[in-house]
Amino acid sequence: MTLARTVLITGATDGLGLALAERLAADGADLLLHGRDQAKLDGIADRFAVRGASRPRTVTADLSDLGQVRRMAAEIRASVDRLDVLVNNAGIGAGKPDGRTRRTSADGHELRFAVNYLAGFLLTLELLPLLRASAPARVVNVASIGQHPLDFENLMLEREYHGMRAYAQSKLAQISFGFELAGRLPADEVTVNSLHPATYMPTKIVLSEVAHSIDTLEEGVTATRRLVIDPALAGTTGRFYERTRDARAHAQAYDSEARLRLWQASLRLTGAEDPLG
């Protein structure tokens, strides 16, 4: 496999993000790691350096605050001259440790939709010029096989709220955005793919909520790493994978009108400029 030179991983201080970072560091990647806690990031960077890997650069942001997402993107643009891969991995689950009741972000959006989807949408658009300038580049969305169709008249789930529905609609939004963005970009510039990396890996989110695991972290790392660096996937875009298998997402993700409606709503909710419009 040919290793991409610079890889940004969001949510890299534990779980899949950290395990993926460890694997890519061993491969010799130039890593840029995101988290909310600078002390944690510093400890991880120090540990990688002690093991002989290149010391990763770090960026902090609370993804429930879109202002912090913008600040992080600006910091990245100012600190690196290229970005080969963006891995949108950070997220919160359907229940513990973030609670089962409806909560809102700093910007007033439903929390799971804000953290799991809107933050990645905004970050991707903010970094898109850098990704395109680094062509061929890749965007990898860590989504889920758990998906729920979006009700555009109740996108913030002010009615009929349930944590699992909120989580599942945020994951379908990730995938739908990935399909839409892939269709707007030349595949030789930037590819955009999403995946369900594994089921109930032993992460903080899973163990807090269901207290047991099914798949290993290594299974999730293997599936995600494949989308990051496998040369056989060069030019492959607009796909959803279940682990390493090409799979079908929820039918709404293939509805061009629904995807456009989500794109327009996401621009409005984040205040982002459309870099492709």
Image: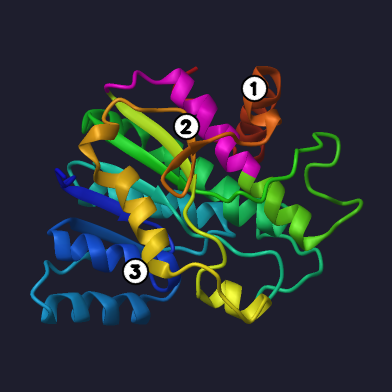
Which mark lies nearer to you, 1 or 3? Answer: 3
Question: Nearest the camera: 65 or 57?
Answer: 57
Residue 242 on image: x %, y %: 51, 46
Residue lying at 46% horizontally and 56% vertically, measured from the top left: 89
Residue 143, disc? none
Res 93 → quadrant: bottom right
Q: Tag 1, which secondary structure?
A: helix
- Which residue is under mark 1? 260
* Residue 45 seen in this snapshot: yes
Q: Choose the circle earlier in sequence order: 3 or 2.
A: 3
Which mark lies nearer to you, 1 or 2? Answer: 2
How far is the residue under mark 3 from the one under mark 2?
Answer: 23 Å
- The amino acid on which the numbered mark 3 sits, given as a three-letter code, is Ala
Which segment is the magenta one?
172-188
Residue lying at 75% horizontally and 59% vertically, measured from the top left: 164
Q: Choose the circle earlier in sequence order: 1 or 2.
A: 2
Few, some or many residues within 10 Å of mark 3 (<14, 14–19, 20+): some
Q: Residue 26, relative to residue 135: is it above or below?
A: below
Question: Nearest the camera: 241 or 12?
Answer: 241
Predominant secondary structure, magenta span: helix
* Residue 108 seen in this snapshot: no
Q: Tag 2, which secondary structure?
A: strand
Residue lying at 81% horizontally and 69% vertically, measured from the top left: 101
Quadrant showing the N terminus: top left
Q: Residue 228, relative to residue 152: is it above or below?
A: below
- The amino acid on which the numbered mark 2 sits, given as a three-letter code, is Arg
- The amino acid on which the numbered mark 1 sits, given as a three-letter code, is Leu
- Which residue is under mark 3? 19
- Which residue is under mark 2? 239
Few, some or many residues within 10 Å of mark 1 (<14, 14–19, 20+): some
Q: Tag 3, which secondary structure?
A: helix
Res 218 → quadrant: bottom left
